[in-house]
Image: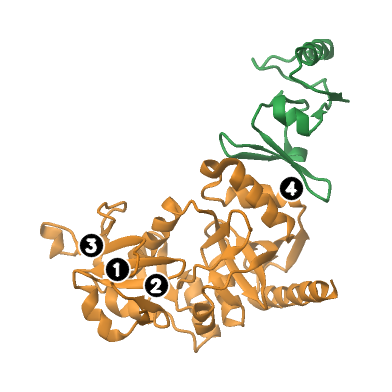
Amino acid sequence: MFWITKGWRFRQFADGQGLVFNPFTGDLYALSEIPVSLIIAFGDTAASCDVLFRRVADTVDLDGEPVGEETVKSHLAALVQLGVVTSVSP
Amino acid sequence: MPSRLIKHDLIDLRALSGVVLSAPPFNFRVRACAGPLGKAFFAAYADFERSDDSAFVDFELKIRPVRGLRRFVRPLISLEIDGSEPFDPLPAAQAFPLLEWGMNWCVTSSANQYLMCHSAVLAKRDLAVMLPAPPGSGKSTLCAALMLSGWRLLSDELALIELHSGKLVPFVRPVSLKNASISLIRDRYQSAFLTVPVVDTLKGTVAHLRPTKTSVDLARIEAFPRLLVFPSYISGAQLDVQKLGHAAATVEIAKNAFNLTPLGVLGFESLCRVVERCDCFVLRYGRLDEALAWFDLMQNQLLAKHYAG
């Protein structure tokens, strides 16, 4: 999973292309180039962009183990319930 | 009161007070107690101003001989910057390149009032082009050719971006040329002044091209970027130009940024503002004539768009 935590910045250009920026490390990612299939945004960043939910089948959890679609969905449901994820877009 | 640098100032290079070189937006005090610095320094900076001793000095640089036997036998010199020596000693013949690298280091290590990118910057009729590129991509050769073809130089190495306005602040200095590009520029532009090439440096053979007088005279005039071009030179290649989306261009220019991490969100926002203003391209070229013609075409198109509103 590609975690976008509080404090990150999201930017969308007029041509529709998006960027995320990690201000703590200086890492910058074009959204089309992120090599993972699931991106979760938290806190302030989530307030400024929808969570981007891509192909679930290839999602990998933080320990590097593959997880199935149902596990991811239940993780997301828990995060929504906790209020740290504002929306999920398939 | 600033005055033009003159050869007579060579004596002052060796004095305690040195020479305060005005290279806007910075002042450098340069002292040289060793090495053949004087001739190259005054030739490369011939059109620049010398600030008087009351001017605020941003950086203090001193070329001095090393201690011990290497002061006399195959002499080595070192560069002292604000009391410390960030570089290894080099042969005395490399005094001027060492000074130039030192001046770059001064700015990139401390000028965090700007967002700084490894990029050439030039402008024609107030439309500025940035050429971000890693070393070895042909950026400096292209920059030199553009300058000598009528574009004014803002910088050949460091783009200084005002954080809030997104304006490009000129930092005009001699253009550093390496290896084959030295003879290429010398043969093509015979009235251009280059310092005597210095061999066997870490970057190969190095010479410096004096900036045009127009570039120096306009060194305090900022410009807004309008064209962002990522150049790469491949010998014999046909001209190939690909348009780049803004997000991809931002990621590419970020790879050439010196201080995006310490600037954090402010740097990111500034970078995005710069890219948003620009048409962005990847340019692969094998012949200078073709590359120069493309830049003139783009400049004409952008100007026509600008004046059409």
**Chain hosting mark 1:** B
Disc 2 marks a residue whose amino acid type is Ser
Depth order, front residue of B282/B181? B282
Q: In this orientation, does residue B252 appear?
A: no
Pointer 3 or 1: first along the chain: 1
**Residue B22: mark in rendering:** 2
The residue to which callout 1 is attached is B30
Residue B40 coordinates in the image, percent (x, y): 34, 77
Pointer 1 or 2: first along the chain: 2
Determine contact: label 3, label 2, CB under 8 Å: no
**B128 relative position to B169: left or right:** right
**Residue B77: mark in rendering:** 3
**Chain hosting mark 3:** B
Disc 1 marks a residue whose amino acid type is Val
The residue to which callout 4 is attached is B247
The C terminus of chain B lies in quadrant: bottom right
SS under mark 4: helix
The chain shown in orange is which? B
Pointer 1 or 4: first along the chain: 1
Pointer 4 or 3: first along the chain: 3
SS under mark 2: strand
Determine contact: label 1, label 2, CB under 8 Å: no
Is residue B309 shown above or below B83? below
Q: Please name the residue shown 77% across and 29% down the image.
A: A47
Pointer 2 or 4: first along the chain: 2
SS under mark 3: strand
**Circle 4 residues within 10 Å: few <14, some 14–19, many ≥20:** many
Whether labels 1 and 4 share one chain: yes
